[in-house]
Image (spheres, coloured by chain):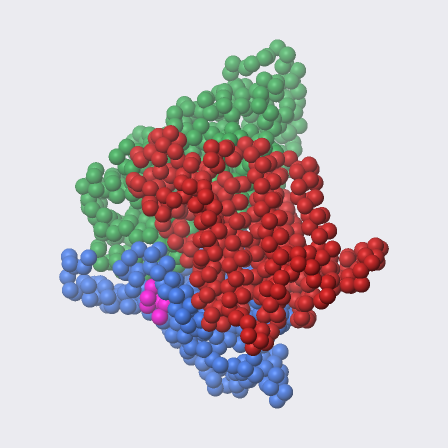
Chain colours: A red, B green, C blue
Amino acid sequence: MIDNPRFANRSELIGILVLAVLLVVILPLCLDVFRLNLVAKYLTYAFVALGLVICWGYGGILSLGQGVFFGLGGYCMAMFLKLEASSPENTKIQSTPGIPDFMDWNQITQLPFFWKPFHSLSFTIAAVILVPAFFAFIIGAAMFKRRVGGTYFAIITQAVAAILTILIVGQQGYTGGINGMTDLRTLKGWDIRPDHAKVVLYFFEVACLFGCIFIAQFIRHSKLGRILVAMREKEDRVRFSGYSVANFKIFAFCIAAIFAAIGGAMFALNVGFMSPSFVGIVPSIEMVIYTAVGGRLSILGAIYGTLLVNFAKTSLSESFPELWLFGLGGLFIAVVLAFPNGLAGIWGDYIQPQLNRLMPSGKSGSGPKAGWHDSSVADGAPAE
Amino acid sequence: MSDDTKQGLQSAFRRKLLMGIAAIPALTVLPRPSFAQAPATSAINTTGLAVTDTEVTVGILHSATGTMAISETGSIEAEKLAIEQINAAGGILGRKIKFIQEDGASDWPTFAEKAKKLLVNDKVAAIMGCWTSASRKAVLPVVEQYNGMLYYPTFYEGLEQSKNVIYTGQEATQQILAGLNWIAKEKGAKSFFFVGSDYIWPRTSNKIARKHVENVLKGKVVGEEYYPLGNTQFNSVINKIKLTKPDVIFTDVVGGSNVAFYKQLKAAGIDLSKQPLLTISVTEDEIDGIGGENIAGAYACMKYFQSLDNPNNKAFVPAFKKMWGEKTVIGDVTQAAYLGPWLWKLTVEKAGSFDVDKIAAASPGVEFKGAPEGYVRIHENHHLWSKTRVGRAKLDGQFELIYETADLVEPDPFPKGYQ
Amino acid sequence: MFGEYSIGDLGSIFVMQGFAGLILFSVYVLMALGLAIIFGQMGVINMAHGEFMILGAYVTWMTSNFFQTYLPNLFSGYFFLAMILAFIASGALGMLVEWGLIRHLYRRPLDTLLATWGLSLILQQAYRSIFGAREVGVELPQWMLGSMHVTDNIEVPINGVFVMGLTVLITVAVAYIMYKSRWGRQVRAVVQNRVMAGAVGINTEKVDRYTFALGCGIAGVAGSAFTMIGSTGPTSGQLYIVDTFLVVVFGGAASLLGTIASAFSISQTQSTLEFFMSGSMAKVLTLLAVVGILMLRPQGLFALKVRK
């Protein structure tokens, strides 16, 4: 395509701007702190959904174990916060003051070695990004170098999620077990629990989210992004053209893992705890559905999808808990059967053409397929 | 769903209430509780809770969906029954209880989110809820931060105490020690084999049990095994039990694993009428799924059995069945959940206020003489004084009471010498 | 660890432990067979497999209630009828699902994962609405309980023997259908080259539908049999799915032999490890070993080369 800016074309820029206005201005003005904090929680999943757009939508690699990376990031952050909350003064009543409460309950009398570096915030931030990336690299390298993909890969990531959950629950002296790490209080002495802190954290999270959106946009418009799409469509041809397919896949998988981990760290900060219930199979698959609803090919769609599904979950499960499960199940089926491109597909197929007719953009390239979504998944047409 | 049954009652109640309101100017702060007169809302609710002149709102927070719905359904039912009975008896300080039910969906963060919603948006005066320790641990910082009041029904591992929580179930020592003493004395048991699900409650309970067996009973623990939650294959551990031939099998396996464990134990030819087994995780609710024929003969250590023979329980069981169906069974936790609304009502009346601080301060010493388990009293540490009972499972899925402690057992969430 | 026990005790425990491993093996085969057939045939992973199993369990429960109320004399034999009914119920539901859902997604195998996951959520909630949130207890006839007494230490669980027998029976039946019958030839033809099979006059759509129904039906029988050893509740199906998937993937697609070999190796590893360490650690080590081997040999133990 001729119209190939390095970062974003016009309609994409508008889309990002609209999202920015929504998240930075409209939502904080309209919602009370409680609801805003809920939005912050939803947005932590948006990081995961964003990563899935890169690795599933573009790379064609479906991971059903993104909860693993969300959890790793979250646990790294939670370990730092827990250590700070377990100062000797706060834990006077324990038999060993100065260590997290769950260690004390499990007769551990000194801090395990792998906990010690988490006294440092800079180490923690590095760990949030590097630990999941390392894991993703190991898994990716082993699988993609041997040309494993598709359903196999999905099932194996799922097994990894199951293993990590059992491990975390089983090693409760070191991890807090099934309770997770609760009662996280301060960040470098700054209380993260009161309302004003929640607002600050919300804006910080939105800023990080836009950082990730920019990275995703950049990847999408770079040569790398186009190779990923080419790989998804005809892996063999890309390989015959001399590209190392495995390396590109590993890269996409690692990026998705890092995004998920940032989301997990944000979760620990915003919600104030971390538990193995985010690591398992069920949350991992739910995170995939956020992406699918938003549109697996659309970076912004993934974020809207996450927000929408979670809003629906909260409001529906408040009034009709039973209906919600039917609804969620139906959503999975409907998205797959009828709207494989999710909201972004609906937008691109029905709404944007109308908009374009109303406000001619003056550019020759803005046909129905030049919007901020790619071509559909179902018809299998080349996307670029 | 429970509202439409009370229409007639409500109008009679309103009349009373109007009379009460008419008398308000004369009363400022009530020195003693009273059903007939309703004190002014401003006097009994200084912190902006959801209390009106006719109603007070509480929250019910359990899992209606997900894997824990199996266990938590009974608690929801018991709490609704208690609320309905309290309303039928005139409510609290002249106010009818209205409840908002939220679904924790067996997901701990959801519990925290919903607890926050109940406290911040709905301003509920109290929350009856949580079941697993994990959900309580998730909710605890929320109720402490927003100063709510949580009535928690499940027997649990202890090691916790909060101004904002009343624990209506037993903590670990209350549940375990008397039962171990009894079985050691009765069966001359010296060697024990522990089997549990792998999470904090079984691990802590077994830790306490081990210390007690080794230090107090001078016995021996010949095996301690944990399986992941939801495990369905127990043949290996059953073989180990056969090899070590313990005097007593002590179990705290939970959930669906429970069913698998007892079915396979029976199939392996271990006859529970000859091989003593003491469980702290099987109530009448669980037997429903396990099947009476698979567990008959096992001993359970609880504070309540549906078959208890006392006047309170004789009124409670039919009332429960009338509301929820003839086939429902009532387990230990269900009964403890039933205590929650009643204890709250009694405490509010003692404090003469819905304010959480006053309730927390007034709680110690509150006694509930109408408890189906007999009699309970709130301890300084916000747990309940209650008896420990041992029952033997029968074929029909009920327990036969074998032993109960003579006195109420003191709750001790931070037991010295057991940590 | 074993110093304090006599040789005789140890010997019989090892026999028993071997037997426990065999039971676990049968359970795994029974769980995985239905899924393996579907996966091998269509490349579809049916995430609702566990829920099809639980449907079979609920059918068994209803049959047992029916017999207890109306035909108490025949109660001792109800289980056989229940298994047949479970097969029919799960198979029929499977056929419906294939028709309404799966056949639209053959070109997108990854999407079937999501769609069948959605189906499993719907089924779980449906069970909860229909049968209640609590577990139900399936009453078994007396002869199926307890154990056969061999020596003081060796007691053979009857339900274990029953599951083993059932597994053998079903495996043989499936092998016969797949490798000897006319329909089996058609199935294998479609697996090897769908277009070509269609060109020679095989109705591939019909083959797909019946294969899916067969897989689901076997899941229903497995669920029915597992009422003897496990729980029956709305979410019980979830207890089995991870193990089931691993067995199938580890065995390699499209290979009955692979599924059996993988079930055997996983069950023996787990059962042996369980004897020497805590069940949780045994589970983790087994899963790690499986994933580790899959990293080295991602196509599974036995892989069939097919033309795509």
In the rendered image, residue B378, in percent from the top left (x then y), is placed at 41, 27
Q: Relative to the observer, which residue lies in front, B35 or B260? A: B260
Q: Relative to the observer, which residue lies in front, B333 or A270? A: A270
Q: Residue at x 43, y 35 (%)?
A: A85
Q: Residue at x 51, y 54 (%)?
A: A258
Name the image quarter holding the C terminus of chain A.
bottom right
Name the image quarter holding the N terminus of chain A.
bottom right
In the rendered image, residue C144, in percent from the top left (x then y), is placed at 36, 65
How many numbered marks are there? 0
Q: Residue at x 41, y 43 (%)?
A: A118
Q: Is residue C30 left or right of residue C207?
A: left
In the rendered image, residue B403, in percent from the top left (x then y), is placed at 30, 38
Res. B20 image quadrant: top right
In the rendered image, residue C69, in percent from the top left (x then y), is placed at 49, 59
Residue B418 vs C147, above or below: the answer is above
Magenta region, main secondary structure: helix
Residue C53 vs B152, above or below: the answer is below
Q: Relative to the observer, which residue lies in front, B36 or C46? A: C46
Task: Say whether residue C269 is magenta.
Answer: yes
Res. C273 image quadrant: bottom left
Residue B333 vs C240, above or below: the answer is above
**What is the magenta range?**
C265-270
Q: Residue at x 49, y 21 (%)?
A: B358
Q: In this view of the protein, can residue A166 be seen by the observer?
A: yes
Task: Say whether residue C298 is magenta.
Answer: no
Q: In this view of the protein, can residue A151 be seen by the observer?
A: no
As drawn, the residue found furthest toward the bottom would be C200
